[in-house]
Amino acid sequence: QRVGFALVGIGKLTSQELIPAARTSEHAYVAALVSGEADKAQGFARALGLGEGDAYTYEQFDELANRDDVQAVYIVLPNSLHREYATRAARMGKHVLCEKPLGVNAEDAQAIVDACREAGVLLMTAYRCQYTPEHWAARDAVQGGTLGPVRLLHSIHAQVEDDPEAWRLKRDLAGGGPLPDVGIYSLNTLRFITGQEPEWVFATQHQPESDPRFREVEASMSALLGFPGGMSATIQTSYAAHKTTTLSVMGEKGSLTMDPAFPYDGLKLRISSEDGTHEPAFPEYDQFTLEFDHFAGCIRSGRGPWTPGEEGVQDHVIMDALYESARTGQVVRLPGSAKADAFR
Ligand code: NAD
């Protein structure tokens, strides 16, 4: 039997990606919808073949407690609202799938992890790229030694945000600018494919406050991350640069490039090594269906998800350090690391 999800927040991601993806999922289905607007929720419910009683307003959210067929809640709201709705869902005994970034900072994200642990429910951070065959092939090439010891990594995730009123440009709702929204893909992917954690970070940011879009959050950030053994990575992210999503990894014996690296489809991977240059082909898939199916499988088996809440917290710990570095102009050492002292 498929696992029933309630989708909370019917914005662009829910309407354009998640609802279609759930339709093709073998193991998950949308059992309920929650929105600020009753009419909107009912319209989407009807289109899914659900009844009026399956559409809830935010005020009615806690009534999901009475729905045994809703086993999981998928939170697709502006970032600062993740904690409230994840905590309330956990208290109802519902498993939680939460969009990235998990919260607005490490403390906020950790509170979500704690609430889910206390309630005994599963928590998954929706890092869709970690479920794609392209990202797994890149990880296998790096961790399987095809490239030799990895020395350098570089990733860019940029796009233009036009609307000065967008919630993504409000610090209270978003927690930051392009870094937690799109730069997080670069950061999370570097950690995923290398399996390593940075020891120190250094960052600069540009915030032209005369531009009404960037009164509250950065327009661009450039960051340098140092890993054990001398491996280093650069990450660049922006809300004021043309749409770009790339990732490059340079080892001693080979290199790989993903361009584009982070869209919903059409990812391209090229691996160059002693065996020549290859562009592996992969069967078609829907990233959101893969996520739904993975979490549904976890709920059925009681197994923890591949990208648990802790994975979301770790990115926040690093992003908090990047903001601290940009503010102070100093290298910031990450917890548990002695290396940065030597760098200083
Ligand atoms: P969106 O602006 O399209 O939708 C947000 C929804 O939240 C809307 O339905 C809006 O009405 C509702 N909302 C409730 N309270 C609100 C408030 N105070 N201010 C503004 N909106 C409010 O956003 P989205 O693109 O769907 O993003 C939602 C979440 O999904 C975010 O956490 C975002 O980071 C994440 N996201 C992830 C991906 C991905 O590829 N995994 C892609 C896009 C967005």
Image: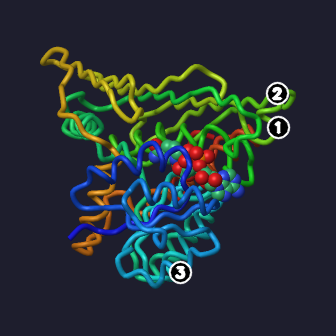
Residue type of the residue flagged with mark 1: Arg
Mark 2: give few (<14), some (14-19) or many (20+) Cα within 10 Å. few
Q: Pointer 1: residues within 10 angstroms few (<14), some, or many (20+)?
A: some
Can you tell which quarter of the image residue 228 is in? top left
* Residue shown at 56% from the left, 33% from the top: 224
What residue does disc 3 label? 63
Work out whether residue 158 or residue 341 is closer to the camera in this orientation and state it: 158
What residue does disc 2 label?
211
| Cα–Cα gap, marks 3 and 1 | 39 Å
Q: Mark 1 = which residue?
A: 215
In screen coordinates, is 108 left or right of 140? right
3D distance between C-alphas at marks 2 and 1: 7 Å
Which of the numbered marks, if any, corresponds to residue 118? none
Q: What amino acid type is highlighted by mark number 3?
A: Glu
Asked if labels 1 and 2 touch by Cβ distance under 8 angstroms, the answer is yes
Q: Return the x and y of residue 273 as percentages of the image width and height.
A: 20, 20
Element at label 1: loop
- Which numbered disc, 3 or 2, marks the residue closer to the eye? 3
Quarter of the picture containing the N terminus is: bottom left
Q: Amino acid at mark 2?
A: Asp
Any atom of ligand 1 within 8 Å of the CB at mark 1?
Answer: no
Using the image, determine if residue 302 lies above or below residue 202. below
